[in-house]
Image (tube, helix red, strand yellow):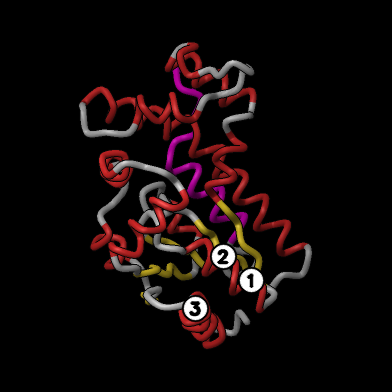
Amino acid sequence: MLAAMNDASLGSELQDMTSKHIPVIGIVGGIGSGKSAVANWVAAQSDVAVIDADKLGHDALKSDNVKDALLRRFSIDILGADGSINRSALARKVFGDHPEQLAARHDLEQIVHPEIGRRISEDVALAAANGRKGVMLDAAILLEAGWRKLCDLVIFVDTPDAIRWSRIQKNRNWTEDELRRREASQWSLDRKRQDADFVIANDRDLEYAGRQLLKILGARGVV
């Protein structure tokens, strides 16, 4: 049995914890869109914290409960030489459109997403306790994971494909096939764009995109 809370109970628990506190602004975009850079730029100009869900996901893999559940599902093949979860080995099992990969990704999400969600709620509460006026939840799979219900607004960072691919080549050293496999595991960019409350353009310098986000947050009294 997978060690996971069902989506409905998780969403209810996290919503109860976060709705009593500061505004939560979801930041989404395609791989290489620069959404993290935009969020961090805005955080440097304001009293709004950034929650990096990708980092929380990496940390979650170190949790004993999560690690044990992953080993039961995927075997020791996903362990690195140091005994930790080898994310590259795990990625090969879950990213792609083969039925086995789709089933594996579903099981991975059932194991890991609740732990990431718990850590998100803790970080929101911590930001509120520290007097922050809001938080930006930087999460590539925010919409797919059902974390939209935790957010007061969702912002889509719209970046041309050529710019995204250039960044991916520079920062991640992925092949085009790897990018396609990764993107196949997420909602399409059109679907994300349509589901967001606002779209900002990140096709120039960082300040250009950052000021668009600041304007949205300012209009709502977050900054």
Pick whichever, 25 or 61, lies toward us.
Answer: 61
Q: Is residue 184 visible?
A: yes
C-alpha gap between disc 2 and disc 1: 8 Å
Crowd tier of the residue under label 2, counting other residues whose Cα lies within 10 Å: few below 14, some 14–19, many 20 or above: many
Crowd tier of the residue under label 1, counting other residues whose Cα lies within 10 Å: few below 14, some 14–19, many 20 or above: some
Q: Residue at x 50, y 75 (%)?
A: 206
Q: Are marks 3 and 1 in contact (CB under 8 Å)?
A: no
Q: Which residue is mark 1?
A: 43
| Count of marks placed on residues | 3
The magenta-colored residue range is 1-18
Q: Which mark is residue 213?
A: 3
Tag 3's secondary structure? Answer: helix
Picture coordinates of residue 169, whole percent (x, y): 38, 50
Q: Amino acid at mark 3?
A: Leu
C-alpha gap between disc 3 and disc 1: 10 Å
C-alpha gap between disc 2 and disc 3: 11 Å
Q: Residue furthest left?
A: 98
Tag 2's secondary structure? Answer: strand
